[in-house]
Amino acid sequence: MLGQSSTQNDSKVTLCIMRHGMAENMVKNDASRQLVSVGEEQARDTSYWFSQHYPHIKIDLALVSPYVRAEQTFNIVKGHIPIRHKLISRDVTPDASAAHFCDYLSALLESKSDFNEINAILIVSHMPFVSFLMSEVLYSKEGVLFNTGSMAVVECDRATLKGILAKHYQGVL
């Protein structure tokens, strides 16, 4: 079954890739942009959608961009979805390398740490990174565009981090 924490097939991992909610217009420092009320609503709506469609998935690890709008999105999401661990990661910022992130994620999944029982991962990030990440993890190599506040659920082979798109919820606009 897709993404069951602690009982899932050891050869699979579920990636929940989410773009932050709508943020204020560009400011001098992009990293400090905050969510607007619509962005907060988008994060709540997507959290609700996920909890209704995937109640059996418990997020073992959240990897969150250090940008304010991503952290604000995560803080809303964690109020609706069970999440065991959170790491702030510069590897999921807008201009980060999706290929390098996949290498990091593979190493994390193989490590013998607190994270060795990871069955479901939430990534809260930005465009264009989330689209490039989809190109890296999907067998089809297709890029996927994300509305603000949207989430893709990808069932991946743990060893290769390649998988299929189970659902892509575009959320409220």
Image: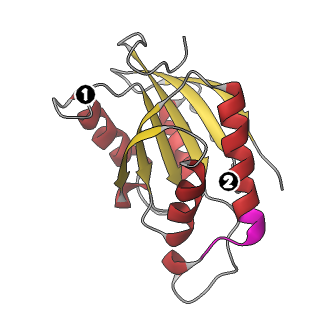
Residue shown at 59%/26% (left/top)?
140
Asked if residue 55 can be seen in this view, the reply is yes
Q: Nearer the viewer, residue 3 or 85?
A: 85
Q: Is residue 56 left or right of residue 60?
A: right
The reply to whether the magenta stretch includes residue 37 is yes
Image quarter of residue 48: top right
Residue picked out by circle 2:
43
Q: Which mark is residue 116?
A: 1
Residue shown at 33%/38% (left/top)?
105
Marks 2 and 1, Cα distance to the nearest angstrom?
Answer: 28 Å
Give above or below for 17 relative to 14: below
Q: Quadrant of the N terminus?
A: top right
Q: Is residue 118 left or right of residue 110?
A: right
Give above or below for 61 relative to 64: above
Asked if residue 149 can be seen in this view, the reply is no
Image quarter of residue 41: bottom right
Q: How many marks?
A: 2
The reply to whether the magenta stretch includes residue 33 is no
Q: Identify the residue at the far bottom of this view.
A: 28
The reply to whether callout 2 and callout 1 are in contact (CB within 8 Å) is no
Q: SS class of the residue under badge 1? A: loop
* Magenta residues (range): 34-39
Q: Is residue 153 left or right of residue 109?
A: right
Residue shown at 41%/12% (left/top)?
7
Q: SS class of the residue under badge 2? A: helix
Give above or below for 132 relative to 30: above
Name the amino acid type tagged 1.
Answer: Asn
